Amino acid sequence: MIKKILVANRGEIAVRIIRTCREMDIKSIAVFSDADRTSLHVRYADEAYRIGPPPSAESYLNMDAIIKIAKKSKADAIHPGYGFLSENAEFAEKVRKAGLIFIGPSAEAIIAMGDKMRARELMQKAEVPVVPGTGALPDDEAQIKQLASKIGYPVMIKASAGGGGKGMRLVHSSKDLISSYRRARSEAASAFGNDAVYLEKYLEEPHHIEFQILADNHGNVIHLFERECSVQRRHQKVIEETPSPFLTEETRQEMAKHAISAAKSVNYSGAGTIEFLMDKHHHFYFLEMNTRLQVEHPITERVTGVDLVKAQIHIANNEPLHLQQEELKQSGHAIEARIYAEDPYHNFMPGSGLIRHISEPLGLGMRTDGYVFEGYEVPVYYDPLISKLIIWAPTRSEAIDRMKRALYEYKITGIKTNIAFIQRIMEAKDFIDGNYNTHFIEENLDFLLQPSEQSKEIEDIAMIIAYLDYQNKQNKRKDFVTHQQKHHSNWKNFGRLFRHNPY
């Protein structure tokens, strides 16, 4: 039985996993880079160990160092969270060879679903519908043009080992095909060490819908319904919700059936996500499988009442699933907003810096999964996601209203965030009506970048707080100098002021 888990990750997901460990009376071990020495996951874990310098290649991606710490601290298992090493088959195999439990699928399943072209082939054998496309593109550019013409424009060039929008290009005509192919291939080689790319038919007005599955080591597979993930910017999700406002119940059941087939086709074990693209006519196609916990898993937890991390640990303990499919129901509506340290008004530039003030929203139906606090300095080395705001309400319209209220209460000063941008999404007619697809942000960008009345009020409040803080510091400085002038020269006064009160 697992009694001690090393969390091979950082930030909000590390904190979230450690919380479940504490509920299960399982000891938790955090690892941290030099940049994360004061991070919340380090404070919250039962034990914490330095893993290396700030760059992730020298810390959170250092497989041997992580396993060495796990052995030294007498951990039973390693939970990889998401990102970093979570879908790395080599790491999963190294963990098992070290006599530890990898809380995730087998290396074989990760390999099978990690390569997009191989996954397409497996899905076709399992009779799961896939988007029309090709295998690995040849070096012959004339042949590439023929393949694209056969599929029909627009087409997507995708990296076989890709993810997160890297190595991906949308091509509308043959004149842009070869230059886009070269750029995608170069980017794929740089990002993944694999320059293989393939073509896929681009679906117009597509919806990005994914199904959460759980599978044990005894052949049982269930789904926990869908998540609508179509509010994206540059192929990165910004808002997710469940249930999807676009799906019919008939389509939901059909997609769920194929999601389970997809998991069974690779003898999957653990938590995973089957991602689909759906066109405006409700025709859907397999996109990929994420062999890990998803960033947006909390909304599924909120509408089903299932702790997915707890389920992962039970499965890793070789226990059969505690749930039957007929027991699972969707209750109410949940929305997640990803809070980033970025500036939407300057091309979404990622930011860093010292958090001077933070007020998280409270009340019925609120959940925040974050890792930052007042006085914490957001590092420059990692993903700018600092928090996730999860809202639940009995209906979708109530959930939107509750999200608006929560965003009004959510105040962070000292760094730039996308909170006002999220507020505008909640005010957009297409989002309120549930009439949106993956082009939503692109098509509504002008509206979304206009500050809302609430965000203007928040900005005014933040300016007043900053001004009062400045005045307070100025008054302290004057009082300090006045006091010191009674006993010392001005040179000594200012020297001491600089040392002791360097504002």
Image: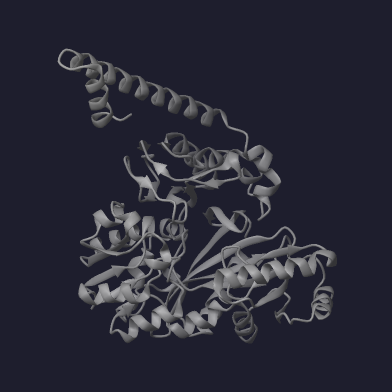
Q: Residue at x 34, y 58 (%)?
A: 16
Of residues 464 and 275, the one drawn nearer to the viewer in this rendering: 464
Q: Quadrant of residue 470?
A: top left
Quadrant holding the C terminus: top left
Q: Is residue 458 above or below residue 198?
A: above
Q: Is residue 460 above or below residue 425?
A: above
Quadrant holding the N terminus: bottom left
* Lateral position of residue 163 relative to residue 487, left or right: right
**Render colour scheme:** one colour
Is residue 91 something that shows in the picture? Answer: yes
* Lateral position of residue 173 relative to residue 161, left or right: right
Residue 42, percent from left and from top: 27, 57
Q: Is residue 18 above or below residue 483?
A: below
Of residues 329 and 275, the one drawn nearer to the viewer in this rendering: 275
Residue 236, percent from left and from top: 57, 57
Of residues 478 and 429, the one drawn nearer to the viewer in this rendering: 478
Residue 292, percent from left and from top: 45, 70
Q: Quadrant of residue 486?
A: top left
Is residue 201 something that shows in the picture? Answer: no
Q: Residue lying furthest left in this view?
A: 487
* Lateral position of residue 83 relative to residue 428, left or right: left
Q: Residue at x 84, y 67 (%)?
A: 174
* Lateral position of residue 115 relative to residue 213, left or right: right
